[in-house]
Structures are given as structure tokens and as C-alpha cells.
């Protein structure tokens, strides 16, 4: 258990309206009441972060209780401690939270893995949830009661699917007035969450989230992988690879993903195969190292003499890049380099409009390479449209990339498939 004042810079990014809903519930619930909220869902989906962000939003002190079979009533209510020549009673998180609520108008108790608490100890919370008071057994049934102008918010988190954890007593579970499910976000939302929290480039988040969704699918559909690739794990991995030198990328993939998600050799092989199929290491390596000579190679006889490219590229891809480079140079001769990029480093649309009018097939073949980064899948899930019509890349798809992924497109054209 720990008490935390509202001074941490942590923010939950809601998927739909779950934060707004809970904020409204807490605001409109009558004063003088304890409000029980039970958040359930798979690990790493932000249940605790949501609870913390709510407490911060209301500028309220909050207490953590980590659910455990070893937790007993004295840990929750308080206990006597023998000191030099005398005993002193140490009040527990329940009584301290009541005091803070009475002093400040509101306080929070956050109980992680609430269903890990023994059924006999869950009784300690019953009277607080239903009658807004507790009587300390170990201190002569001393009464601690919530004032009529105060609120106490008790948020429990749990994963209903975990085996071997204590069941919630029906009488205890019923005292939580609502039980919202917090699950994994949709891909586009998860990319936003990961990039904002970890601080990584958006294109990095896209690559990692895409791999995570594939691993989750295999874990939930054929159960060949024991653990789910959680949002929390994605954030941690992106944070690691962004902050650490890129030469540790291989170790971070093994230690943060493969070894954590796979319990057996077969599971780890399965995860590694998914990552290899996604060109996971190659894509991330190209971004993290940029133009590093370690990730470059000489490809065709002509190019070998003067050009270098990321070593993940194939000869036919390099041929497409070379044609796009020549078309770009034609544009620069006519309009100048300053008519390609804005001052903020993003592309101008006039560059792609000219390419479409005068170098259409070259542009189409080059933009088709975005399939290797799954831009077309995001386009499909976002717009419901195909990026191909009669076997060719559409102008609408190119414009969508320009409008919604301009910064990613710059990275794509400078690092992944370099024409600048």
C-alpha cells in the first residue's frame, strides 16, 4: 500500500468515452457516499492509469492497495506496533482515506487485482462500500465514518480470466455499482496512445503495434502463445528502443518481447517467426539508425559504385527508388528544392500533384512500397476503401497518406526507401 499525492505527470488517453463517463459518474453521485467502481480487462490495458488519472483530475489524494492472498484485515484497517516501552496504532489505507476524504472533500482508494484478496478479507470493504464507515476490530471497534459532504471513490481492478485467483464474494462484488470493461484499443488508437506516452516516432509505434496485434491474434485464436502483447508492454518496448542506443535493438526484441511473451521454446520460435514475417527488426533498425553505414549495402552493379541503401531493400525496390529519384530531380530542375518541403519539414502537395500529372506510373510504383509498412491496411481500416483500383495505386490513397501521414511519409522517403 502507498499513499500518493497528486503530483505525478501521468495521463490516461481514453479509447472512447470511458474517462468522461467515470468523471460524470463521480461528479453526479451524491455526497456522503462511497462509490465502488470495478474495472476489469486483460493486463496492461491502462486500468490503473485510468484510476490515477481520475484522482489527479479531481485533485484528490489516493491510496494504492496491491491485492494479494497474503493481505489481511490489519493491512487494510490498521495495526498495533510495539515501540520502545509503548505500543502505537498505525492506521491503514481505509481509515486514512476516510480522513483525507473528510478533510479534502474527496479521496480515492485504488485496489489492484482486487480478486486476489482472500474472501475473508473482502469483508473489510463491505461496510465501507455500503454503509460509508468501518469499525476497527483491532482497536475496540473504533468507528471511522465518511462525512455527509465528502466522497470516497474505491476503484478495484481485475482480470476476470486469471486462473487461481480468489473469487469475488457475490455480496462484495455487488457493492461496486458499475463494472466497465477496459480492453485493448483499436490499432489506430493504440498507435496514438503508444506514441504519446512513450514519446517515440509515430511510425515506430505503427510497426510495433502492428506486430503486437498479430501476436495477440495468435494468442487468443489458437492459444499457441501464453501471454498477450499488452499496450503497457508496447509502451515499454518503444520507450526502450527510443532511449537506448540502436545497437541494442536485437537484445531489446529478445528480452522485452520474445522472452516475456513465450514460456516455451516453441512459443518463442512462433513469436520470432511473426516478427521476422513483419520485417520487424529491419524496419525498426532503418528508422533508429537512419543513414548509419551499418544498415547500408550496395545493391546492383551500377548502384554499387556510388549509392548505398538499407540492406533490407531488394534489387527491384532499389530500381523503383532510382526511377523516383530521377523524377524528383526533374521536378527540382523545374521548380527548385524549396518547392518540395514546407518550413516545418513536411511535404507540399504540389510535388505529388506534379508527379501524378507527369510521372504517374513512377509515383504509383514508388507509393506501392508503402504496403511494406502496412499504410494500406491503416487506410482501409480508417476509410473502408481499397488503395488499389484496377491493379493500380489510387490518387485518393496518395492524398490520404499526404494528409494524414505527412511526417511518416517524410521518414518513408528519406530513410526506408530514400529518394532524398
Image (tube, rainbow, N blue to C red):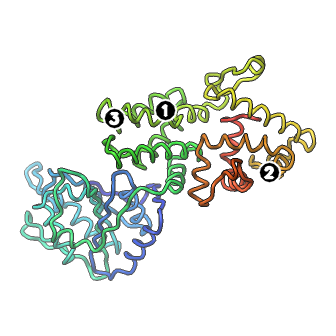
The answer to whether residue 412 is left or right of residue 382 is: right
Left or right: where does residue 197 sit relative to residue 108? right
Measured Cα–Cα span from mark 3 to mark 1? 14 Å
* Residue position marked by numbered label 1 in the rendering: 276
Question: Which x, y percent locates residue 42?
Answer: 33, 54
Helix, strand or loop under label 3: helix
User: Which residue does the numbered mark 3 point to in the structure image?
Assistant: 267
- Residue drawn 80% across the image and 51% down it: 348
Residue 143 vs 232, above or below: the answer is below
Kind of element beneath mark 2: loop
> On the picture, is 345 further left or further right than 30?
right
Residue at the image point whose x is 27% and y is 78% from the top: 33
In which quadrant of the rendered view does residue 141 lie?
A: bottom left
3D distance between C-alphas at marks 2 and 1? 35 Å
Local crowd size for mark 1, using a 10 Å CA cut-off: few (<14), some (14–19), many (≥20): few
- SS for dot 1: helix
Sequence-earlier tag: 3 or 1: 3
Identify the mark nearer the N-term, 2 or 1.
1
Q: Quick check: 293 above or below 37?
A: above
Residue topped by disc 2: 348
Of all residues shown, which one is farthest toward the front? Answer: 390
Quadrant holding the C terminus = top right
Amino acid at each position: 500500500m502507498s499513499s500518493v499525492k497528486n503530483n505525478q505527470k501521468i495521463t490516461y488517453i481514453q479509447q472512447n468515452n470511458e474517462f468522461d463517463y467515470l468523471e460524470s459518474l463521480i461528479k453526479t453521485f451524491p455526497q456522503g457516499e462511497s462509490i465502488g467502481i470495478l474495472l476489469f480487462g486483460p493486463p496492461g490495458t491502462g486500468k490503473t492509469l485510468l484510476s490515477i488519472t481520475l484522482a489527479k483530475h479531481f485533485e484528490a489524494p489516493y491510496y494504492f492497495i496491491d491485492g494479494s492472498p497474503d493481505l489481511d484485515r490489519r493491512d487494510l484497517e490498521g495495526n498495533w506496533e510495539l515501540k520502545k516501552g509503548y505500543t502505537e496504532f498505525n492506521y491503514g489505507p481505509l481509515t486514512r482515506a476516510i480522513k483525507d476524504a473528510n478533510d479534502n472533500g474527496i479521496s480515492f482508494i485504488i485496489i489492484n487485482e482486487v480478486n486476489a484478496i482472500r474472501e475473508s478479507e473482502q469483508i473489510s470493504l463491505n461496510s465501507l462500500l455500503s454503509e460509508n464507515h468501518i469499525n476497527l476490530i483491532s482497536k475496540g471497534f473504533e468507528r471511522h465514518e465518511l462525512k455527509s459532504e465528502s466522497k470516497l471513490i474505491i476503484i478495484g481492478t481485475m482480470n476476470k480470466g486469471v486462473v487461481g485467483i480468489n473469487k469475488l464474494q457475490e455480496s462484495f462484488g455487488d457493492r461496486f455499482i458499475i463494472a466497465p470493461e477496459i480492453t485493448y484499443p483499436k490499432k489506430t488508437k493504440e498507435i496514438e496512445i503508444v506514441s504519446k506516452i512513450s514519446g517515440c516516432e509515430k511510425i515506430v509505434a505503427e510497426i510495433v503495434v502492428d506486430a503486437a496485434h498479430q501476436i495477440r491474434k495468435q494468442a487468443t485464436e489458437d492459444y499457441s502463445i501464453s501471454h498477450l502483447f499488452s499496450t503497457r508492454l508496447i509502451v515499454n518496448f518503444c520507450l526502450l528502443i527510443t532511449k537506448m542506443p540502436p545497437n541494442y535493438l536485437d537484445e531489446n526484441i529478445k528480452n522485452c518481447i520474445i522472452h516475456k511473451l513465450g514460456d516455451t521454446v516453441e512459443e518463442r520460435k512462433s513469436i520470432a517467426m511473426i516478427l521476422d514475417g513483419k520485417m520487424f527488426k529491419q524496419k525498426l533498425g532503418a528508422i533508429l539508425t537512419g543513414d548509419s553505414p551499418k544498415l547500408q549495402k550496395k545493391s546492383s552493379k551500377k548502384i554499387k559504385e556510388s549509392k548505398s541503401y538499407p540492406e533490407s531493400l531488394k534489387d527491384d525496390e532499389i530500381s523503383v527508388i532510382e526511377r523516383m529519384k530521377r523524377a524528383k530531380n526533374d521536378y527540382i530542375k523545374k521548380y527548385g528544392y524549396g518547392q518540395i518541403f514546407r518550413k516545418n519539414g513536411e511535404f507540399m502537395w504540389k510535388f505529388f500533384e506534379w508527379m501524378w500529372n507527369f510521372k504517374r506510373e513512377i509515383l504509383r510504383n514508388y507509393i506501392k512500397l508503402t504496403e511494406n509498412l502496412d499504410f494500406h491496411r491503416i487506410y482501409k481500416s480508417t476509410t473502408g476503401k481499397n488503395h488499389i483500383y484496377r491493379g493500380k495505386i489510387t490518387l485518393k490513397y496518395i492524398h490520404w497518406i499526404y494528409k494524414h501521414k505527412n511526417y511518416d511519409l517524410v521518414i518513408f522517403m528519406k530513410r526506408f526507401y530514400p529518394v532524398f
